DNA sequence: GGCAAGCACTCGGTATCATCGAGTGCCAGC
DNA sequence: GCTGGCACTCGATGATACCGAGTGCTTGCC
């Protein structure tokens, strides 16, 4: 454990580095508020902090830079969730007052909101299907041999699959199949699609089977839960090296990786994952701040922001917490 | 007009610069195949090409770099659409053979395909709504006061809007409204939603009205046509300056701008927009290669790739052309 | 023992300067 | 009209010196 003075010094180093992006020397710290000792004393403590792995010195005669462990201590020592500044808070309020209509659109807009608030990239994972029950299903003919299977879930998500049928299907057959499907799925979970019983009529069963396998297949692996990413331009502005930007973009383009990452962080009970804590090498220079959101009290999805390790954690934590809270309310109130 | 030799030299400069990203000097050109004159002659011609605005010299004693006008000449002089190399062509074939199921998913995957083929960012604009007729509409209750209006269009697009109702709506009222809506919309275009007639029953009309205005409002401006963007990481790798990357990402994040840009380029009868031809200042260092695709012979959407001005135009043109052709087939065959 | 003051030392960043060479423009000659 | 030759330009590269922020350590004070 760090004594009070070392903790203050560490905090001051982190704050200063977040602000300046330059290695910070003992002189700056000594003149910082909250530290009332000489630069020599600061130097001594910084040497200890470096030995303990909280700080890193790029080279002799340079200032210190926080390590992941240093950031971790800093984040953990933040005195609880400071409220968001009022300007930001009112933007959040305005956003959710204005928000209406379309779930996906709102989630996508939410990434923009988060990105605006934190000046980093933002991620929103849409509610998982499993939690929602099926409210309605329909089979709609698009052309003689192609039909669309649509399932409306209670959380407002609409799942749809194109079915390519082996034979022309008449209107009434499609209607029969449609109501058979609805009878077995509505009120249940879409993941139970495999258990739809036979109708007794082979023609109907063929159509129903196509729909069942379409829903079943993609549920397995293909279409991962929807992820919305926004503010990548802001993220790009936070890094010096174009290669770092490229690597981060590569990660953000892989929906499955992003979803897994967020879920993993949440599962580990974390709110912040710093650098290597993310477990993804290309994100070594990034930190992730996440929060789950809930619909009707049930955990639904996750939101988060992804920025450089030297991001403004207080702001990010506050923004993510408030947005997740308001988003939960918004999605539950209906 | 350029005489044959100057044209050859210009082509050689562009090709070399695309390859090396370095200003190219007369010596390299003189030793290039297709140019059989000495470097001194090349120098003379290059001076003329520079005066005419095809080339630019970063500074005295440096080689030449193509200007937008130089690229334009190069692109226009490409001898028609060279076919895609067989490796790429077979990847396209494999992709569309494997493609199935979900329209949006396929379009999103298509950006990945294009990006893989051209090593740049790729954009796919989903089919416009206007072209498609409504095949089916439904109102589904999500909770007592919230319903979802779903419209299935003939091109496989599903439009949905959340309706927040002022009063609890019973099952039968919703069903009535649903069939009233369907009766007036199915077979027509969604843009004609404003003309739905009254049913005579005020309660029904209230619900129908909510759906109508939800569809109508967003059709006007809110949700722009869906755009899928992929391969931004590859784009990032093509530039030196992180600031350039940031600016391009900023553009790509604005769906409306992207859609407008593609449409504008197509409307101008272009296939390639080079640098300032895009009309967007932050894209000064970028070129855009586009192609429309069609469904059932009707123009539906647009695909394109966005890379640095020094991209491989032949490959990009071939890839975009082939993918748009196959995509049209794929979307029409059903 | 703990903190501060002083001091020698380190070492990256910046500026200066010379060198190098790719590339140019131009002229004379074939 | 093309080419070989030549003087010239100027960014890139590298060596050198210098500066100064920052460090570690030692000494002295409370």
Image (cartoon, coloured by chain):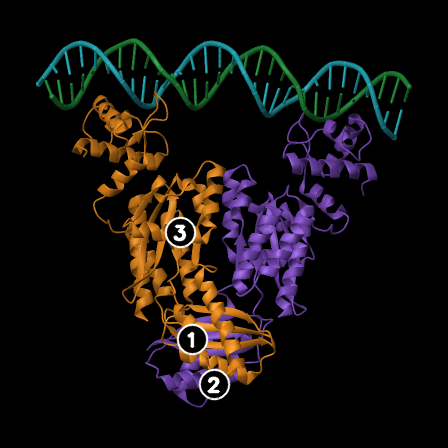
Chain colours: A orange, B purple, C green, D cyan
Q: Which chain is mark 3 on?
A: A
The residue tagged 3 is A122
Q: Quadrant of the C terminus of chain A?
A: bottom left
Asked if both marks, 1 and 3, belong to the same chain, the answer given is yes
- Residue placed most toward the observer, B74 or A289: A289
**Going by the image, does A188 lie left or right of B11?**
left
Foreground disc of the pair 1, 2: 1
Asked if both marks, 2 and 3, belong to the same chain, the answer given is no
Indicate the quadrant where residue A196 lies: bottom left
Total tally of numbered discs in the picture: 3
Q: Residue at x 53, y 54 (%)?
A: B229
- Residue placed most toward the observer, B270 or A65: A65
Q: Residue B325, how many percent across, how many down?
A: 67, 60
Asked if both marks, 1 and 2, belong to the same chain, the answer given is no
Label 2 packing within 10 angstroms: few (<14), some (14-19), many (20+): many
Name the element at disc 3.
Answer: strand
The residue tagged 1 is A196
Q: Residue B301, how many percent across, how many down?
A: 61, 63
> What whole-number distance in Å separates the C-alpha atoms at marks 2 and 3?
41 Å
> What whole-number distance in Å separates the C-alpha atoms at marks 1 and 2?
31 Å
Q: Which chain is mark 2 on?
A: B
**Going by the image, does B129 lie left or right of B208?**
right
> In the image, which disc is placed on residue B180?
2
Indicate the quadrant where residue B298 lies: bottom right
């Amino acid at each position: 454990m760090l004594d009070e003075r070392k903790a203050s010094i560490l905090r001051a180093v982190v704050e200063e580095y977040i602000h300046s992006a330059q290695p910070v020397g003992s002189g700056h710290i000594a003149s910082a508020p909250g530290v009332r000792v000489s630069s020599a004393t600061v130097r001594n403590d910084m040497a200890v902090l470096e030995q303990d792995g909280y700080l890193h010195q790029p080279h002799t005669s340079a200032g210190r830079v926080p390590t992941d462990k240093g950031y971790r201590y800093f984040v953990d020592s933040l005195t609880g969730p400071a409220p968001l500044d009022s300007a930001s808070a009112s933007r959040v309020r305005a956003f959710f007052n204005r928000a209406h209509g379309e779930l996906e659109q709102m989630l996508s807009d939410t990434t923009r909101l988060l990105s605006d608030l934190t000046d980093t990239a933002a991620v929103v994972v849409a509610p998982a299907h499993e939690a929602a029950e099926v409210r309605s299903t329909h089979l709609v003919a698009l052309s003689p041999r192609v039909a669309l299977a649509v399932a409306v879930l209670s959380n407002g998500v609409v799942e749809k699959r194109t079915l390519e049928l082996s034979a022309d299907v008449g209107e009434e057959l499609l209607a029969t199949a449609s109501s058979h499907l609805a009878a077995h799925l509505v009120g249940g979970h879409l993941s139970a699609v495999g258990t739809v019983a036979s109708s007794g009529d082979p023609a109907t069963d063929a159509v129903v089977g196509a729909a069942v396998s379409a829903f079943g297949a993609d549920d397995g692996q293909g279409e991962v839960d929807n992820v919305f990413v926004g503010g990548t331009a802001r993220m790009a502005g936070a890094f010096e090296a174009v290669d770092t930007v490229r690597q981060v973009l590569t990660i953000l383009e892989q929906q499955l990786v992003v979803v897994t990452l967020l879920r993993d962080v949440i599962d580990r009970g974390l709110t912040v994952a710093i650098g290597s804590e993310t477990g993804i090498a290309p994100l070594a220079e990034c930190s992730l701040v996440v929060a789950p959101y809930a619909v009707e009290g049930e955990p639904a999805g996750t939101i988060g922001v992804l920025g450089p390790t030297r991001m403004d954690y207080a702001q990010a934590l506050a923004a993510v917490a408030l947005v997740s809270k308001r988003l939960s309310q918004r999605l539950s109130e209906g």
